[in-house]
Image (spheres, rainbow, N blue to C red):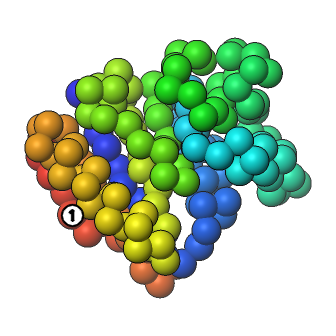
Amino acid sequence: MPEVRFYHLTQSPLEHTLPGLLAKSLERGWRVIVQGGDEARLAFLDTHLWTYDDNSFLPHGLEGEGAAQPILLTASEENSNDAGVLMLIDGARAMPERMVAFDLVTVFFDGADQGAVATARQDWKAVTDAGLPAVYWAQENGSWVQKAKSGG
């Protein structure tokens, strides 16, 4: 059963938060799918992940560039790189029935976008109603603070 983590972005944008979490995933030997809904945004993130830090390397690729990538950026719901981690960004959603195919699911949402906050609340309810363990994290004073946890 996966743990579902909700990340409420209020102090730094996704492009500052995502690389660190991807690096931690790779350190743990996890393969990751980053699923978004906008191809142009995924292309931006693809370039960003190559250039965000001169001292860092995150092996990744866009869907269609080879499923063997440990980090795959995609708009598809396919798990073509056999990932254990699903990261949902920019409004991409997954129902609990799909989430159970992963070890960890993260849902990122922009705190400045009231529509994204409302959707995250709906998704939290769907996840907890399905009995999946969930944790809600919010940014405070430059760090992540756990605000809620549901058993599952």
Residue type pointed to by label 1 = Ala
Find residue 97 and report its horizontal and vertical position in percent. Answer: 26, 26
- In the displayed structure, 51 sits above or below 26; it is below
Find residue 86 and report its horizontal and vertical position in percent. Answer: 47, 35
Q: Residue at x 58, y 43 (%)?
A: 36
Tag 1's secondary structure? strand
Q: Residue furthest bottom?
A: 141
Find residue 107 and report its horizontal and vertical position in percent. Answer: 42, 50
Circle 1 packing at 10 Å, graded few (<14), some (14-19), many (20+), is few
Q: Quadrant of residue 73?
A: top right
Q: Residue at x 52, y 19 (%)?
A: 79
The answer to whether residue 119 is left or right of residue 63 is left
Q: Quadrant of residue 50?
A: top right
Q: Which residue is mark 1?
A: 148
Along the line of sight, which residue is nearer the eye, 53 or 87?
A: 87
Along the line of sight, which residue is nearer the eye, 116 or 111?
A: 116
Q: Quadrant of the C terminus?
A: top left
Q: Quadrant of residue 127?
A: top left
Q: Residue at x 66, y 51 (%)?
A: 19
Q: Residue at x 65, y 46 (%)?
A: 38
Q: Tell me, yes or no, if residue 128 can be seen here.
A: yes
Q: Quadrant of the N terminus?
A: top left
